[in-house]
Image: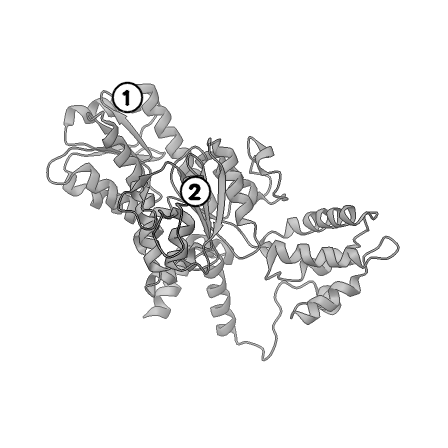
Amino acid sequence: MDHAGPVILIVDDDPVAVELIRVSLMSQGFENIEFCTDSRLAMETVRTRPISVVLLDLFMPEVSGFDILQLIVQELPGLPVIVLTVDDSVDAAVKCMRIGAFDFMTKPVDRNRLGSSVNNALRLRELEERLSLFGSEPGVVDGPRRPDLFREIITRSPRMEAIFQYVEAIAPSPKAVLITGESGTGKELLARAIHDASERRGPFVPVNVAGLDDVMFSDTLFGHVRGAFTGADRPRSGLVEKAGNGTLFLDEIGDLEMSSQVKLLRLLQEGEYYPLGSDEPKRVTLRVLAATNADLIKKQENGTFRRDLYYRLMSHLIRVPPLRERGEDLDLLARHFARDTAQAMGRPVPQLSDEFARLLKMYPFPGNIRELQAIISDAVSQARDGIVPTGLIEDYFAAHGGVSSADAASDKRIHWTGDFPTLGEAEEFLVSEALRRCDNNQTAAAKMLGVAQSTLSRRLKKHSD
């Protein structure tokens, strides 16, 4: 009989062990517990049942726990797996954590530690589900426990507050984090906040991999030995070694060459790399954060991004919303940039009129926060008598395909240029745009469109047939 609450699945071929774990969990308030004693049926169970956490034994006949863990990480990367085994070796623990286990414990399992680990996994799962739906509604999100970690990110957006909560939850994890979002949304600032929250002993080392060919990528990240190539008259350590015990942030990961992706995958899987010209691998302990504004799903489909690397990077996934989806932050950011610019120029902080604020809300900001900062800085530098004239941004918006004062007066969210679309064309555009903004997450796109997820799925299936 099912009970309300998250479903915990125990995968173990030993019925006695299953019963001991079940009793331990029930004594701590977990009611919805299922079990699978045939490892051949484990993947079918997690594929067809709404499982929230998996408790997995390693050594089972037919299919090993290592193989099941690998499949879950590849097919259901958001599903936390806690490994429970009699093997207390460091090698087994390291292997499981590198594959992507949420936690590793030896039997007999400590009751309190098991309960704590399951609660942590459920909490992380809850935050991920909230993020997939763009966070909670205004007034619901409590915000981060340590707001000082996010002081560089100016916001009052509930969606950003939900992201901050998620960052605090995943900060201690050694797993990779993939940060997606358009250019200028502040992905590197968020990566720095993840590093600061993790309290890792090593430094935060950022590198933009866009435009690096395979040799440059290898030399930059992994370094080289003496004589590796012409002119290499002395050895050179790379940024991976510099980031040891810290965080390596790879920006524009979607532009990485396929040959370089193989080397990065080895670093993530094995924790080792080869300096150029060396036959001996080096080992390192670090955390990898990656960011991109590219559609990695499409890149996988056209063969320019490895699927296994994608799943390895998105152990934790954060989508940073564009500025046009953070309307509550526009005025706050504009006044922040106006104050910073005025102080840097030694001038009094100018006033931003209500009309100025209305115009800002009508522009889509394709360059996001970076573009807003440039607009405000330029406007403040031209301010006279302590007031920023609205004509400056009207001219800018008109030159960049934006809005006019007449558009602002109408206070519309949708503006069409050219021939007026048919109802079918408008519907097709809205569905496509919602899916694009949601990274093809149908649940989130349906919420944005104000329809049920099943309605959106039926529409997409109908148009694909």
Camera-side residue: 65 or 42?
A: 65
Residue 175 in view here? yes
Q: Position of residue 142 (x, y in %)?
A: 56, 34
Q: Outermost residue toward the left?
A: 61
Label 1: element kind: helix
Q: How many marks?
A: 2
| 1 vs 2, front mark | 2
Query: Residue 369: which quarter of the image?
Result: bottom right
| Label 2: how many Cα within 10 Å (few below 14, some 14–19, many 20+) | many
The residue singled out by tag 2 in the image is 128
Residue 332 place in picture, x, y as percent: 69, 47
Residue 286, percent across and down? 40, 38
User: Do the residues bearing badges 1 and 2 touch, measured as CB atoms within 8 Å?
Assistant: no
Tell me which amino acid carries mark 1. Answer: Ser
Q: Nearer the viewer, residue 300 or 195?
A: 195
Q: Farthest residue in the bottom direction?
A: 419
* Mark 2: amino acid: Glu
Image location of residue 215, percent across then percent down: 37, 57
Separation (CA) of disc 1 from disc 2: 26 Å
Residue shown at the point (52%, 73%) measured from the top left:
423
> On the picture, is 359 further left or further right than 255?
right
Q: What's the mark number on residue 24?
A: 1
Locate the C terminus by quadrant.
bottom left
Q: Residue at x 35, y 28 (%)?
A: 117
Residue 100 in sight = no
Q: How is the image coloured?
A: one colour
Q: Which quarter of the image is occupied by the N terminus?
A: top left
67 relative to 447 in the view: left or right = left
Q: Nearer the viewer, residue 353 or 22?
A: 353
Q: Is residue 18 left or right of residue 248?
A: left
